[in-house]
Amino acid sequence: MKIQATIVLSVAGVLATMMGTSTLIGTTQAEQRTLEAAANRALAVVKAAESAGAHVASMHESGAIDMKALLAGAREEMQRSNGDYRSTRAFGAIPVIAAIAAAEGAAEGAGMDLTLTSRDARNPKYDPTEDPKAGKFRAALLDELTASATKGGNLSAWRIDEENDVMVYQHVIRLGENCMACHGDPTTSATDDGKDPLGFRMEGWKAGDVHGAFEVRTPMAPIRAEARAEAASSALVGLVLAGMGLATLVWLLRLRIIRPIQRM
């Protein structure tokens, strides 16, 4: 019996060590998989936004939306709303604004927050430097992504903001021809003052330029919970298999070794 106990305990110790190492590795791998899954969900939300924006842009091109007419009446609308350009019909017809409006609900339903991020944004809410909590992190990621996309590299990137415990996913926004009436050459200003019809100074951007990004923020707590659940499930299966293997070993020891020794 001492021989059997020694062998069984030795094998059990080896199995426990292997299972502990496997569980640790499995947890790390599970968290990486859940992060990649979260990034894919964020990309799906961005694609939905891009699709909505592209649809609105196509309506501009076909004439279904007469942006010139909307912009022409924008200043009058702003006068009635105490200068609030966001209340104008022209603002709501901007493709990227329509894109955000269309995809926000889907993002919220999936536990994510969808927004825009752009340096020197006209709307302070979209300027990461105006965010005292996570602005530095968001701006750094945006700068990195913009540099990559400008050189023909990645169009999207994600990082974990450890301080705020959130995964930040960004996907670049490129200006289209329909953006030039507001963001293009100041010398083409419809009001001959270098400003667009909403009263903002035109920046001299060109079609195709990277100007900000869609940003999707996902809390890390549910991602970690998903990873732990996956790892625990795998560990349970491993524990059951190890138990069956150990029981089989005990049976074989008794049958092939212990009983012959006892008979001798």
Image (cartoon, rainbow, N blue to C red):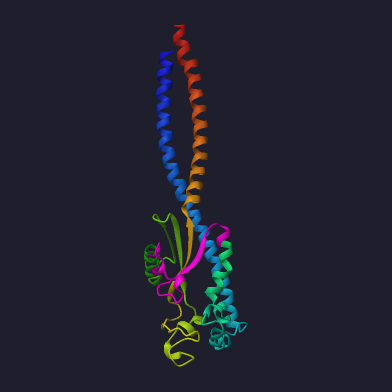
Pick out the residue farthest to the right: 64
- Considering only vertical position in the picture, is 67 above or below 226? below
x, y percentage for residue 252? 49, 19
Q: Position of residue 95 (x, y in %)?
A: 54, 76
Quadrant location, the C terminus: top left
> What is the residue that sits farthest to the bottom in this orientation?
192
The image quarter containing residue 27 is: top left
Residue at the (48%, 50%) spot, across then down: 221
- Locate the N terminus by quadrant: top left
Q: Residue at x 52, y 74 (%)?
A: 96
Q: Is residue 149 covered in magenta?
A: no
Percent x, y of residue 7: 41, 20
Relative to 185, say whether 210 is above or below.
above
Near-viewer residue (88 or 111): 88
- Based on the displayed image, in which of its 4 quarters is residue 21 positioned? top left
Could you tell me residue 60's position as x and y percent?
58, 81
Q: Which region is colored magenta? A: 107-135
How many numbered dots are placed on residues in this image? 0
Horizontal side of residue 24 vs 197, given as left or right: left
Using the image as rendered, state which of residue 132 and residue 189 is in the foreground: 132
